[in-house]
């Protein structure tokens, strides 16, 4: 089915549904939510080249993960480091680093937003780490965004949309 549909057409249909899903104005109907889930699966498959479904047939994540390269400054205590992202979603991002922090570590993130203006500042938590480059990807850490306010969530959504449009 994926080969019959142009990815740009999938993005065009996905984006307005995704905006309504995240902002709830107006809420998605059950049929629209099912279509959003199908589109998300098709897009993730197109982006990653593999199924985003786990061994039990469930989606592996709640939001679409999109490849991107954004500069991110992260602070833990008084230590400031700069890295770049490999992927971003509405719920978090993957930071490339050869020195990933321990799972559960809280961080303050400043994500460069380009022409959107000032960096997006949000709190996050390390949820998983990959310590060495391997067949699954680069060394780094998965970060979950912790309770971004509405303005930051909208800005993150815009970054995801932009990355999606550029990726396909």
Image: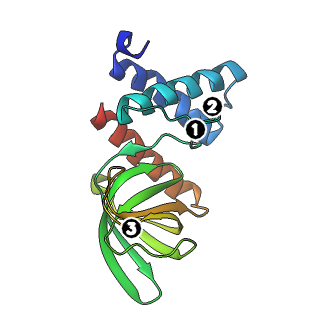
Q: Residues within 10 Å of mark 2 (few under 14, many from 20)?
A: few
On screen, residue 134 versus residue 143, left or right, reads left
Residue 34 to residue 131: above or below = above
Where is residue 117 drawn, in percent x and y?
A: 33, 59
Q: Are marks 2 and 1 in contact (CB under 8 Å)?
A: yes
Which residue is labeled 1 in the image?
Answer: 54
- Residue 66 figure quarter: top left
Around disc 3, counting alpha carbons within 10 Å, would you say few (fewer than 14), some (14 to 19), or many (20 or more)? some
Secondary structure at badge 2 equals loop
| Distance in Å between CA atoms under marks 1 and 3 | 22 Å
Say which residue appears at 70% left-offset and 23% top-offset. 29
Identify residue for label 2: 57
**Label 3 element class:** loop
Give the numbered dot on residue 131: 3
Q: Quadrant of the C terminus?
A: top left
**Front residue (pair 75, 127):** 127
**From this viewpoint, which residue is outermost toward the top?**
4
Gap between marks 3 and 2 measured at Cα: 28 Å
140 or 113: which is nearer to us?
140
Q: Position of residue 20 (x, y in %)?
A: 59, 33
The answer to whether 155 is drawn above or below residue 53 in the figure is below
- Quadrant of res 163: top left
Instruction: Please determine whether, in this image, residue 91 is positioned above or below residue 19.
Output: below
Observer-nearest residue: 149 or 84? 84
Quote the CA–CA distance across marks 2 and 1. 5 Å
């Amino acid at each position: 089915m994926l080969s019959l549909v142009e990815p740009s057409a999938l993005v065009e249909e996905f984006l307005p549904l995704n905006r309504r899903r995240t902002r709830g104005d107006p809420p998605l109907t059950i049929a629209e939510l099912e279509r959003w889930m199908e589109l998300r699966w098709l897009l993730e498959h197109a982006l990653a080249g593999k199924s985003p479904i786990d061994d039990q047939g469930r989606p592996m994540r709640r939001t679409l993960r999109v490849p991107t390269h954004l500069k991110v400054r992260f602070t833990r205590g008084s230590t400031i480091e700069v890295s770049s992202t490999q992927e971003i979603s509405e719920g978090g991002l993957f930071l490339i680093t050869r020195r990933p922090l321990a799972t559960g570590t809280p961080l303050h993130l400043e994500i460069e937003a380009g022409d959107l203006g000032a960096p997006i500042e949000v709190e996050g938590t390390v949820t998983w780490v990959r310590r060495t480059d391997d067949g699954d990807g680069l060394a780094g850490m998965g970060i979950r965004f912790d309770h971004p306010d509405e303005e930051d969530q909208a800005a993150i959504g815009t970054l995801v949309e932009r990355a999606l449009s550029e990726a396909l």
